[in-house]
Image (cartoon, coloured by chain):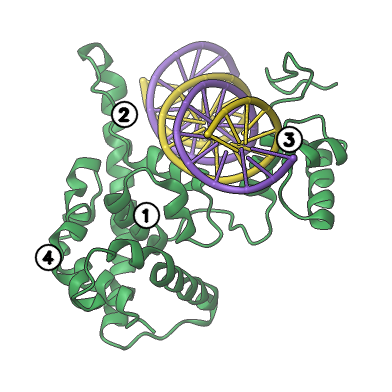
Chain colours: A green, B purple, C yellow
DNA sequence: AAGGGAGTCAACCGCGTTGTA
DNA sequence: CTACAACGCGGTTGACTCCCT
């Protein structure tokens, strides 16, 4: 048995650690033939020396068809930020609104980008300086991304949205995201607000927007763009997104 | 070139929930 | 109704990579 980088075999004899291509192939084959579920059976019958849990996780987070790889789009990031402000660490709920993304991915993204780090001591002056420089660089990148996103959303709001051919996939993704938001997320958001219309209540409910506007807490740099009232602008943009006006 | 810190991501663990016998 | 197994979720950890000094 090959032991990969410090991982190896558990006390009960089951393998743990990174999956090999062969293991992936076996799991893929078995699940596509027999379907998901009964993971402990999958582990045994597929000839995998893994726990059922491990098989399920590998399938859900990596092998399942339709999963998106690569960086989250600015739209997805915005949605994560907003939904996290509503629901907190309900990663699986948030993931359900983002087709092709897993709770693990979203959780990692959030921890990486927004988790507040413990304050460093004076003895860590040098790394701090470095971190600051990196932060500045990231900030620049995020601002560029944000400007792009803002531009696109403004076009959407003005009803002048033309999907470039290369972005046809993104447009389809946004369709799916909005459908999910309407079907799964909005009913939760408005379950105690039956008397108002959906779009009105979205724009009016300070509670719903509150989380997004507390982004100072998590070092999001949306509010550093000069010349724009970001709170209002993005609030309107996301509201129009929820209304389906981008279509 | 080497060492070390920070960032990232895949995977594990523990626990609560749900389903079933 | 109860016990047990399976599942799902959120938190945490370990290893790898990148970048800086």
C12 vs A49, left or right, is left
What subunit carries mark 1?
A: A
Q: Which residue is under mark 1?
A: A80
Q: Which of A157/B4 is in front?
A: A157
Judge the density around disc 2: few (<14), some (14-19), many (≥20) Cα neighbours within 10 Å. Answer: few
A6 vs A209, left or right, is right
Q: How much space separates mark 3 and mark 1, taking CA atoms?
A: 28 Å
Name the disc covering residue A19, or none: 3
What subunit carries mark 4?
A: A
Q: Which residue is under mark 2?
A: A130
Q: How much space separates mark 4 and mark 1, taking CA atoms?
A: 21 Å
Name the disc covering residue A62, or none: none
Classify mark 4: helix, strand or loop.
loop
> Image quarter for residue A107?
top left
Q: Position of residue A76 (x, y in %)?
A: 41, 60
Q: Position of residue A80 (x, y in %)?
A: 37, 54
Dots 3 and 1: beta carbons under 8 Å? no
């Amino acid at each position: 048995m090959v032991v990969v980088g410090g991982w190896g075999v558990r006390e009960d004899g089951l393998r743990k650690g990174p999956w090999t291509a062969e293991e992936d192939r076996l799991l893929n084959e078995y699940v596509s033939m027999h379907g998901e579920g009964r993971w402990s059976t999958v582990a045994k019958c597929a000839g995998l020396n893994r726990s059922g849990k491990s098989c399920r996780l590998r399938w859900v987070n990596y092998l399942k068809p339709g999963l998106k790889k690569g960086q989250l789009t600015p739209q997805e990031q915005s949605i994560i930020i907003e939904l996290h402000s509503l629901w907190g660490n309900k990663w699986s709920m948030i993931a359900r609104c983002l087709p092709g993304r897993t709770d693990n991915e979203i959780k990692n993204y959030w921890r990486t980008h927004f988790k507040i780090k413990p304050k460093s001591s004076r003895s860590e002056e040098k790394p701090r300086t470095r971190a600051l420089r990196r932060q500045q660089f990231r900030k620049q990148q995020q601002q560029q991304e944000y400007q792009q996103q803002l531009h696109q959303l403004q076009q959407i709001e003005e009803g002048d949205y033309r999907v470039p051919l290369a972005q046809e996939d993104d447009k389809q993704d946004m369709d799916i995201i909005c459908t999910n938001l309407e079907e799964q997320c909005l009913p939760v958001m408005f379950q105690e607000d039956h008397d108002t219309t959906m779009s009105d209540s979205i724009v009016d409910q300070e509670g719903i927007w509150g989380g997004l506007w507390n982004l100072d807490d998590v070092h999001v740099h949306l509010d550093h763009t000069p010349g724009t009232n970001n709170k209002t602008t993005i609030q309107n943009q996301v509201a129009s997104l929820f209304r389906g006006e981008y279509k």
